[in-house]
Every structure is written in C-alpha cells, then in structure tokens.
Amino acid sequence: MSLPRILCCAAVVSAALGMATTELAAQTPGFSGNSVKIGVLTDMSSINAHMGGPGAVTAVQLAIEDAGPIGVPVEMVSADHQAKPDVGASIARKWYENDGVDMITELTNSAVALAVQNLARSLKKVDLVTGGVADDLVGKSCSPWGIHWTFDTFSLANGTTRTVVQQGGKKWFFITADYAFGHAMEARATAVIKAMGGTVVGGARVPQGTADLSSYLLQAQASGAEVIALANAGTDFATAVKQANEFGITQSGKRLVATIIFIPEIDSIGLESAQGLALTTNFYWDRDEASRAFATRFTARAGRDVVPTEPQAAVYSATLHYLKAVKAAGTDDATAVIAKMKEIPIEDFFARNASIREDGVLVHDLLLLQVKTPAESKKRWDYYKVLSTISGKDAFLPLSESTCPHVKKG
Amino acid sequence: MSEQTSRAAALVVLALAMIAAPAFIYPVFVMNAMVMALLAASFNLVFGYTGLLSFGHAAFYGIGSYGAAVLLKDSGWPMPLAMVGAVVAAMVAGFVIGGLAIRRRGIYFAMITLALAEIVHFGIVQWPAAGGENGLQGVPRGSLLWLDLGSSTTLYYVVLVVITAALALTYRIIHSPFGRILHAIRDNEPRAVSLGYSVDRYLLLAMVLSAGLAGLAGALKTLIFQFATLNDVHWGTSGLAVLACLIGGTGTFWGPIIGGVILSLLYSLLAESGEWVSLILGIIFVVCVHLFRDGIVGRARAAAGRLKAATKFTA
C-alpha cells in the first residue's frame, strides 16, 4: 500500500470520527431521548432464571400497560446477564451511557446487582433491585438513586427467627452453606435468637454442592434443638429438605425453617418432602383477591404453567410505581423521579404498608408462611398457608443502624 | 505489493481502526474484547507452543483480578503499581502451580492445573477480604500521571497501549530463541532433551510468563469493570480461554486474539436474545469445531496458501 492510500484511509476514518461526535437530536423538555426507557437485566439462562428471567419481562410489560399513557412513549429493553457480573455491568453501562435507558430493574444475582448499583450511582441513574438480596445494596453500597424493592438477607433472617421464637421455638440448630450468604444469614439470625432469649445449641458449615448431608442431619437430631434452620439456597436447600424428610425430622416434631426460598423450588421438591417448612417471603400469589387477579393475568400472558414469583411481583410493583412517579414529576431526571417515588403513596398487591426510606429500603410487610401438606393442597400451586404478617418496621434493619454512607445520622 | 508491505499496511489500518474505535463502538465492549484476547493469547503461549493444555488459567486471571482489586481498593496503591503487584502475584501462582503440574504431561497436566485452580477458587470463596459471592465491588480506577481514568474513553487508550505492549511481548517470546525451543519441546521432547535443553525449566518459564500475562488480563478487567467476582476464578473462565484459542487457531499469534474477540462479541450480542444464549453458543462451538478444525486463522492460512498456488499455476 502506498503512502497516499494510507493517508486517504486515515482521512476517511477521521472524517467519520467527526461525524459521530456531532450527533444532533430534538429534545422534549424534561425527557431525555423523548421517551422513558426501562432496562430489564435478568438471568434468563442460568440458575436463577426460574425466579426472574422471562417472567420478569412479562411482569414489566404488564406494569407498562397498567401505568397507561404518561405523556411520552415508554420503551423496554431486556438482556440476559448470564450470571456473569462483567457481562451484566457492560450491558448496564451501554444502556445508561449510550442507549438512553433511564432505569434498570430486576438484577437477580447479588454480585450483578451490586456491580450495576455501583455503576448507577456513579452515573446518577435509577436502579430498582428486585432480585438480589445482599445487605450491602442498602448498606455500604447504597445509592441515592437506587431502591431495593424486596427483602434482603437481614429482613429474611430477622423476620423468620423473630416469629418462630415468639411461637415457642427456643433452641436452634443451623445447617449453614459455607459461603458469605450462609454466614451472613446465620450471624443475623443468631443475634435475633439471643436477643429474644433463645439459644443456639449447635451448627454445621456445609460446603456448597454437598450431596450427602446425613452426618449434619444426625448432629442436628442429636443436638436437642427444637428448630433446625437451613441457612442455604437453591440446590443445597432442596437436598437438605429432601434428606431431612428421609430422616423423619419434621415428623419427629422438630421444626424445619428455611431462610430464602421461591415457589418454583417448592414445586420441584414436592409437597411430600417440603410439608411443614416455615419460611419468610413478601408475596404469595394466592394471598388475596388482588394477588390472585395479578397471578391470573400473569399466567395467561406467560402462556406457561407458572405463577408469579416474589421477584416477578416485585418488578411489576417497582416498574408501576416508577412510571407513576415519572408521570407525576413530568421528567425522567433521576433525582426528581426518586423524590417523587418517595413522596407518592405506594399501595398495590405486592407492597403492603410500604414506604421508601432514605437508604433505599422499601419497608413493607413480610409474610410468615408454612408449606401445606399434600392433603391440604387443593389445586395446582396451592402450596402455602399464611401463618402471620410481619410488620415492615420489625423486619427491616432500623435506619439508625444503617451503614449507608449518605444517610445522615441524627 | 510485496507480502511485507501489505502486512505493514494491514497493521497500520488495524492501528487506525483501534484508535478510532471508541467513536463508533462502546469503549467498554472493545476493552472487554481486548482483555479476552490477552487471556486467550496467554493460554496459547502454553498450549499452542508447548502443547500443554492448562485448565487452570482462571486461577491466574482471578489472582490478577482480585490482586488488583485489593491493592487498589483496600491498600490504596496507585494504579500502575497495583497492576504490577497483581501481575507479580499471578506469576508467583504460575511458578507454584506450574512447578507442580509440569512433572506430568497430557491429561494429567490438565487435571493437576484444574485441581490447583479449584483450590485457588475455594481459597477466594473462604477469604473474608474477598467478599464471597458478592465479590469486591466499587474498586476505584484511580489515575495515571495527569490522566483521570474515570472516563471510559481515557481508560480505553491506556488499556489499548498496555494490551498492545503485552501482545507485542508475546510475539517477541514466540519468535525468540526461547520460543523456538518451546516449539522443539512440543514437537519432540526426547530430542530436545538429547540436545541438552533442560525441558522442565523451559516449560516452567513458559508457565510463569503465561500466568503473568493472564494476571495482567485479570487486573485490567478489574480496572475496566471496577469489580472482581468469583466468576473470574471459576473454571468456566479457563474453559473460555481454551475455547477462544480453539476457535481462533492454536499455535498462531493472531488465532487466540481473533478467538477472544469473537467470543466476547458473542457473549454481549447474544445477551439480548433471552433464554437462547447457551443454545446458540453451543451450536456455534459445535459448528466451529467441525468446520474449522485448526481454527479460523489456520483455515484462512490454508486457503491463502491454496490461492497462491493456484495463481502461480495459472500465471
């Protein structure tokens, strides 16, 4: 290649460069890109696809329809982070910086949620986390433009243990997954049990993916505990429940307590094994008329044999409230919209007695549920009975103890 | 146009394209692709040139990424020092893992590297400072001299320079007398021994260099995304390096680079196709393995060779 040709190439490249940087667009005052754009970043193909995934996209579509016209078009984009934080973060960055996305939601998988929230904070953008449960999301990684629209590790551990101790379960044994989530759950729950006059008689740390839990279950049986808490999740949890059933632990009068569990997991374990299990959550499709109505619409739209899970109900609620706030504020500016979201009342089938706190916690009522016996279950997905409602004030970490940097300590 | 000038012209065009890229493509995507390319190139240094299939490159990549995160975030080291620290940490790991693994060949070498990398994974899961499955988040990018790296475009040019230098280094290694000896060991080890070369020392040095480059890729990844997570040390990342190499073509300089770029493109492009990502990727891999047995670069070379022979014949 001769020198003139190389120079010619360079000229073409730099001309194109110049054109790309002088982009012009007509703007409606208050709305960037003349529309409100919502990004659903979720797990479509990995271990958490059943609780978020395509169902979360369906829920967001329903929320956009229910919000009605807000003055500008509402668009939705969705992507699969494949449970890889680097994939998730690079999509989120592109959405926020290049594609004019105003709000990212769902964010199942705590590592992805934390990565996106840190990014959203640095770009001053809205993120509504309905999937991840890490305490840091509203603790040291909190964001003035981020709201955590579901339970966290603290409220799950706190809600369940408080209620079960009140109902008379004083002696506890922990079967804990040996990684950060399990450790955090156990530490939180232990603190509550001790504060309420209960005792922890023993515990076992179990490596992730352990297939044979018999020695741990025998320890639990021999410990004299009244309550056996499973501080684990996913497959580890399913294994523990099935084997506890084989050892006749629930039949022997001991109580089995779960810390985090979603309805598809009960479906896969089966009522025969899971019956009697106590758990805390914030949504059950068959709770009342309003939740049943949503579940019916959701199932019809999804076109599959599914009911909405907690993160799917949460993503509906969060998106609907976000769009109401955008309409009321007349802008998609992050600071103005978040202020409006905190101002206007929230009340839907998901968020009961709810309010948004300064640190980004959506304080709302949680439910203590028990898994039905096969005889009690009358229809498909009829899996839980509601034992009690846990007030949001009792369940979530008090604001005075928050480690969130932008919360002013009084 | 002679072969040399056309090659130089291609390099100039590539350089211009890389310099202009941030104006057209999202810089974080390009940086991610470059990191994947460097990881694949580091793996290729061992697999392509000595024939040893390391299934433990995630350990070096992860040590680089966690090392950089800890040094930047907790110890507050300046960016260049943190990068060097992370690379040194990965090289030490390469020395230990390599030292144990090169005593065996073939599948046993792969198994030993995999096992040791799993130990590194487990160690990081249990290490309190690493934040477990949440990873180390919010790592500051810091600054380099007067440059503020907070802007992705500024960071892009820094990463471009570093990765170009690292790839140039692998090119030098491959084409040095040392690289020739690695070739000789791969092709006929007993003969290399009989010629008086201390094979184990050469292999160990190749492992250490490769670990350092993989560690650099990991450290740059932390700098770009501002976090280190368990995904970096997961064996899946080792698998990715293997795949990138196989798709692009092992034992060639450009093969792993092209493979790495293609893989990272696939991951980000397919992210928006919903539940089908894994299936589509799987099909692509099967097709690649069947149609491009010696990788894209290997195939392209063979095709170019045939074309040359054909033109010679007609002329």
Image: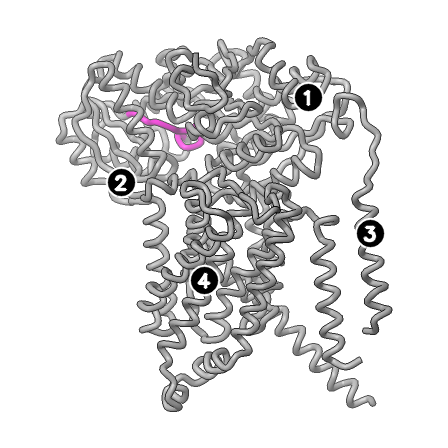
Judge depth for marks 2 and 4 and give the one in front. 4
The reply to the same-chain question for discs 3 and 2 is yes
Q: CA distance from mark 1 to mark 2?
A: 45 Å
Query: Could you tell me which quadrant the N terminus of chain B lies in?
Result: bottom right
Q: CA distance from mark 2 to mark 4?
A: 34 Å
User: Can you give x and y, in whole percent of width and height, for residue B304 in the image?
Assistant: 71, 78
In which chain is the residue bearing label 2?
A
Q: Which mark is residue B212?
A: 4
Q: Tell me the crowding category of disc 1: few under 14, some 14 to 19, or many 20 or more residues within 10 angstroms, Cα based.
A: few
The amino acid marked with disc number 4 is Gly
The reply to the same-chain question for discs 1 and 4 is no
A253 relative to A46, above or below: above
Q: CA distance from mark 1 to mark 4?
A: 53 Å
User: Can you give x and y, in whole percent of width and height, for residue A367 in the image?
Assistant: 40, 16
The amino acid marked with disc number 2 is Val
Judge depth for marks 1 and 3 and give the one in front. 3
Query: Could you tell me which quadrant the C terminus of chain B lies in?
Result: bottom right
Q: CA distance from mark 1 to mark 3?
A: 40 Å
Compare marks 1 and 3 and give the one earlier in the sequence.
3
Give me the residue at 55% from left, 57% from top.
B36
Q: Which residue is mark 2?
A: A206
User: Can you give x and y, in whole percent of width and height, for residue B216 in the image?
Assistant: 49, 57
Image side of residue B83 versus residue A205, left or right: right
Residue interval drawn in magenta: A257-266
Q: Which residue is mark 1?
A: A65
